[in-house]
């Protein structure tokens, strides 16, 4: 199973699920941002030293912590 954290800069992935154990307020916010099943995410880059993951969803750019990105299941497009 691939997570959003596993994606490399320049790759486009499709969200296939969010870990059911994630806090509901966090998973709700992710869905508001567009990180929901079937949506496409473009990975821009990962920060240095296992920092944040910078992604583009539609016309917005977001930065996600490693802990959160590891709980989002994706598949490579």
Image (cartoon, rainbow, N blue to C red):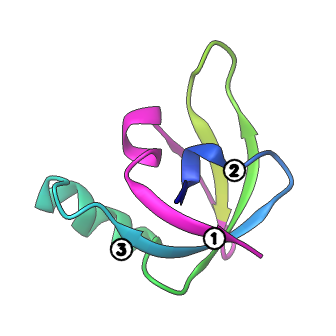
Query: Of label 1 and label 3, which has the lower sequence position?
Result: 3
The percent coordinates of residue 51 (x first, y second) are 57, 23
Q: Which residue is mark 1?
A: 75
Judged left or right of residue 56, residue 38 is: left
Numbered mark located on residue 14 in the image: none
User: What is the CA distance from the residue labelled 1 to the residue labelled 3?
Assistant: 20 Å
Which residue is drawn at the image coordinates 44% and 69% (left, top)?
A: 33
Residue neighbourhood size for the residue with mark 3, other residues' Cα within 10 Å, grouped as few (<14), some (14–19), many (≥20)? few
Which is nearer the eye, 54 or 70? 70
Q: Quadrant of the C terminus?
A: bottom right
Q: Position of residue 19 (x, y in %)?
A: 28, 60
User: Residue 29, position in %: x, y?
Assistant: 29, 63
Q: Is 69 in the magenta?
A: yes
Q: Which mark lies nearer to you, 2 or 3?
A: 2
Q: Residue 2 appears at what percent x and percent y?
A: 57, 57
Mark nearer the N terminus (2 vs 1):
2
Write down the quadrant of residue 17 in the picture: bottom left
Q: Which residue is under mark 2? A: 7
Q: Is residue 62 above or below residue 53?
A: below
Q: Which residue is mark 3?
A: 32
Q: What residue is shown at x 36% (from left), y 64% (from top)?
A: 30
Residues at discs 2 and 3 in contact (Cβ within 8 Å): no
Whole-Å distance between the Cαs marked 2 and 3? 21 Å
Residue at point 56% right, 82% down?
A: 39
Q: What's the magenta region?
A: 57-77
């Amino acid at each position: 199973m691939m997570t959003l954290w596993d994606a490399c800069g320049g790759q486009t992935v499709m969200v296939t699920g969010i870990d059911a154990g994630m806090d509901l307020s966090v998973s709700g916010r992710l869905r508001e941002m567009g990180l929901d099943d079937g949506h496409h995410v473009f990975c821009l880059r990962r920060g240095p030293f296992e920092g944040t993951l910078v992604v583009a969803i539609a016309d917005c750019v977001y930065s996600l912590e490693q802990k959160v990105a590891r709980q989002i299941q994706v598949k490579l497009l």
